[in-house]
Image (cartoon, rainbow, N blue to C red):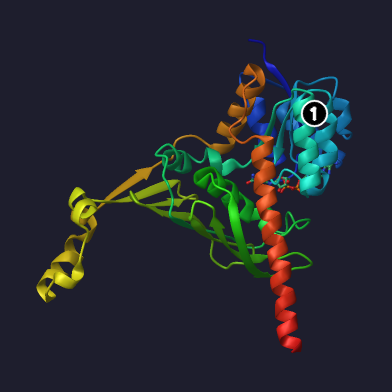
Amino acid sequence: MSRLRMGVVGVGHLGKEHARILSALPQVELIGVADLHLEQAEAIAHRLGTRAFRDPTMLLDLVDAVCVVVPTTHHHAVAAEFLRRGLGVLIEKPIALDIAQANSLVEQARQNKAVLQVGHIERFNPAFERLAERNPQPLFLSSQRHGRFTGRSTDIGVVLDLMIHDLDLILALVRSPVVEVRASGTSVFGRHEDVAHAWLRFASGCTASVSASRASYTAARCMELWSHQGSARIDFGERKLTLLQPSDEVRLYGLDTRKLDAAGLAQLKDELFGKHLQVTEIDCKQGDQLTRELEHFVDCVQNRRVPRVSGADGRDALALASRIVDALRLHRLEERELAAA
Ligand SMILES: NC(=O)c1ccc[n+]([C@@H]2O[C@H](COP(=O)([O-])OP(=O)(O)OC[C@H]3O[C@@H](n4cnc5c(N)ncnc54)[C@H](O)[C@@H]3O)[C@@H](O)[C@H]2O)c1
């Protein structure tokens, strides 16, 4: 099969990594990189032995597919040009600024039979993959994505910037409509929220507590879920999955501590993890997830496959994120009314 001719639009913090990885993939020919900041494009192109452009439309006649790695505000305008030509597009998350733009991109891709993938990279985190393949049926989940201020992605709030990663993962696991959304949060650095907490209820009965912050002193990227099969905890940074599974005996008869005396309780505490709740720790260090995400995209374009994270998935994650942002506004209004009363 001939090499896929690719370009990268936007070679800032993340786009330069896309370009670096694509330039080393044997199944790809990196045709060029485009950035409004031409000096940046030239520096990256020089390093990778490819061409630099200021105007992304210069790539239209030269490539089969592109990665769009510009700030979210520009996603729609840049990606639509390529989709209209039927070219493959991997667009970074969030897919767009609002649902109208997201729907327009999904529709452009459908009409022009173009492959559209959204860069929800945690779907390619091996720890999440190991969990998803077990097909858990969550009863409830909680997730935390906390980090320090980076000064990037300030065109959007923390819900569209960070929380959307977990919203996409939760939607992929729960596969049930969200029937209730509550949220609270605050802004620290400007006009958008920088810390947010949301509580979700799904039609299946599952609930989720999701928190995100870009104003945190300590970093955390983790998710925990409980199902009838036990619990699972993912550390996304460490790429580690920890499963806690009840033994057959506990599954059949339960653990009733009311029947235990002091000695029985002490024994239970000693034996809880291991005998009653089996602990399995799975290290999932293999492969870099951006490389795996890009390889998957190349395969989808070359073999006309539907990507693991389609345009519709990106739109659904954005739709839920937008409901959370609306709920945050409502919560702030209610707070103001309470303060004024
Ligand atoms: N998947 C992830 O985990 C993840 C992580 C970080 C960023 N992102 C996403 O990646 C995107 C880029 O983020 P970043 O941190 O690399 O931003 P950045 O500001 O570091 O880089 C963006 C680059 O795009 C260029 N640019 C802006 N508008 C352009 C246009 N119309 N045409 C061509 N070039 C243009 C800028 O000059 C800049 O070099 C955002 O959508 C962000 O949400 C995703």
Residue 188 visible, this orientation: no
Amino acid, disc 1? Leu
Residue 38 in the image: above or below residue 304: below
Above or below: residue 116 compared with residue 242: above
- Seen from the viewer's position, the closer of residues 65 and 27 is 65
User: Toward the viewer: 237 or 278?
Assistant: 278
Residue name at image x 83 percent, y 34 percent: 80
Using the image, determine if residue 322 lies above or below residue 241: below
Front-most of 36 and 174?
A: 174
265 left or right, relative to 133: left
Image height check: is 328 above or below 28?
below
Q: Is mark 1 within 8 Å of ligand 1?
A: no
Q: Residue at x 85, y 24 (%)?
A: 60
Where residue 43 appears, x then y in whole percent?
78, 36
Label 1: few (<14), some (14–19) or many (≥20) C-alpha neighbours in 10 Å: many
Question: Which quarter of the rendered image does ligand 1 occupy?
Answer: top right
Image point 47% across, 54% down: which residue? 223
Q: Residue at x 53, y 65 (%)?
A: 218
263 relative position to 11: left or right: left
Q: Which element is circle 1 on?
A: helix
- Where residue 284 sits, quadrant-wise, is top left
Spot occupied by residue 44 in the image (x, y as percentages of width and height): 75, 35
Q: Is residue 33 left or right of residue 289?
A: right
